[in-house]
Amino acid sequence: MLNYQLDLKQVLINNNHVEVVDYDDNDHYLEDVDNLHTIWYKYFPKSGSGPSKLVAKTPVLGWNSWNAFGGNINEAKIIAAANNISSLGLKDLGYTYVAIDDTWSNITGRDPTTQRVKPDSNKFPNGIKYVADAVHALGLKFGIYSDAGLTTCAGFPGSLYYETIDAQTWNDWGVDLVKYDNCNVPSNWTDSYNIPTDYDWYNSNSALRYRRLTDALNTISRPVVYSICNWGNANGHMWRLSGDSSASWSYITTIIQQAVYYINYVDFYAHGDMDMMEIGNGALTLTEQRTHFAAWCFLKSPILLGTDLSLLSTDQLAIIKNKELLAFSQDTTYGAAAKPYISASSPAYFSGTSTAGAHVFLINYNSTSGSMTVTFSAVPELQSKTSWKVHDMWTGTDIGTYSGSYTATVASHDTAALRFT
């Protein structure tokens, strides 16, 4: 049985029915559990507000534990990652969040008295607040993981029906970001994808389920970045666009296409999440890692590094520390992502604007080096004149002034990043 209290009403979910006790007139009455999401908002009205505007105006930068360690996490590894962000100079570039992913809690369940989630005492012997305090002491922010289902993807306690309790717990611990997954969801809270194109996703079961935590987070004192593993820019600051990332060129090319599909939704406080970075993992070439990073920047995806930071090479650090690409990502005047200006199934020509000027990004998907031409009249941001000064954002150097067009030689699987003034 699940038991909730709201003012003078008590809602008890037991087997196939929802029982509501009204203490004003001592009435008891039953409702059908098949309409659980409707019943929930009847007694726990939604606020109607979106996620906090105090955080995540620009895409989040930081680190997440999953791609580096999976479930093999502990207090020492998280604090070491925070120290690396500081010592490697990443903090000074805006990398701020240090986030724990799945398997941090006690798999046996919640505290029977408080119903709060319990940390795994072997992995986190001093508790989660101790880790959050250590991260905060470095001038960084702390993130945690939960799930909008009964259990997480790895089978640990989820937050469905416990949103208010968990939001308050995270507030007490000093949590600054919540990654909210989408596993092990009861069938009455899911949606069919065989639906009309004009379906009202805002009022779908999934959207209602995710907005329950949106509302709970809006009741606590700490502003929290809400990272949702589901489509829905109305529910979170950042929303996943795919399944889990992999350290492969095929994943990078596929997620770029997926990001383009949702590109018009990207703006301040609303970021399509291309998932955690794979730089430092697998067998990606340096040019592929350059494209990986550049695309996450110019498509305004959150950038959460996902490797053992202490093992990054000088070349890999140079990629993730590129100030000009990060500046495009973090621009506080222009919130839109760069967009394709030439239509293609594998979009290769992107353009956008920042406070520094107009930008063009060219992706070479081919297995050999090739020439790629920027025709100024074809680029929306370059149509105001015929002559432009071209600047290489990777090297930070001016290339020269060109009239009508500029042709770059782009290595296989690399991305040219250009600024025009």
Image (cartoon, rainbow, N blue to C red):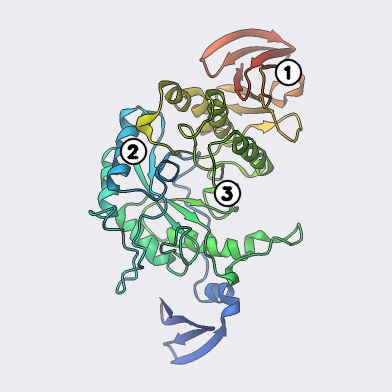
Q: Is residue 272 above or below residue 379?
A: below
Split into 4 quadrants, where in the image is the N terminus?
A: bottom left
Percent of width and height locating residue 336 = 61, 36
In-front residue for pair 173/118: 118
Q: Is residue 391 above or below residue 253?
A: above
The answer to whether one can see residue 410 in this image is yes
Q: Earlier in the sequence, mark 2 or mark 3?
A: 2
Q: Earlier in the sequence, mark 1 or mark 3?
A: 3
Which residue corresponds to mark 2?
A: 81
Q: Are marks 1 and 2 in contact (CB under 8 Å)?
A: no
The label number, if any, that marks residue 376 in the structure image: 1
* Residue 268, quarter of picture: top right
Percent of width and height locating residue 194 = 73, 62
Q: Residue at x 48, y 55 (%)?
A: 180
Q: Is residue 64 above or below residue 104?
A: above
Marks 1 and 2, Cα distance to the nearest angstrom? Answer: 44 Å
Q: Residue at x 60, y 77 (%)?
A: 35
- Name the amino acid, label 1: Phe
Marks 1 and 3, Cα distance to the nearest angstrom? Answer: 37 Å
Q: Are marks 2 and 3 in contact (CB under 8 Å)?
A: no
Which residue corresponds to mark 3?
A: 243
Helix, strand or loop status at disc 2: helix
Side (left or right) of 277 relative to 264? left
Q: Residues within 10 Å of mark 3 (few under 14, many from 20)?
A: few
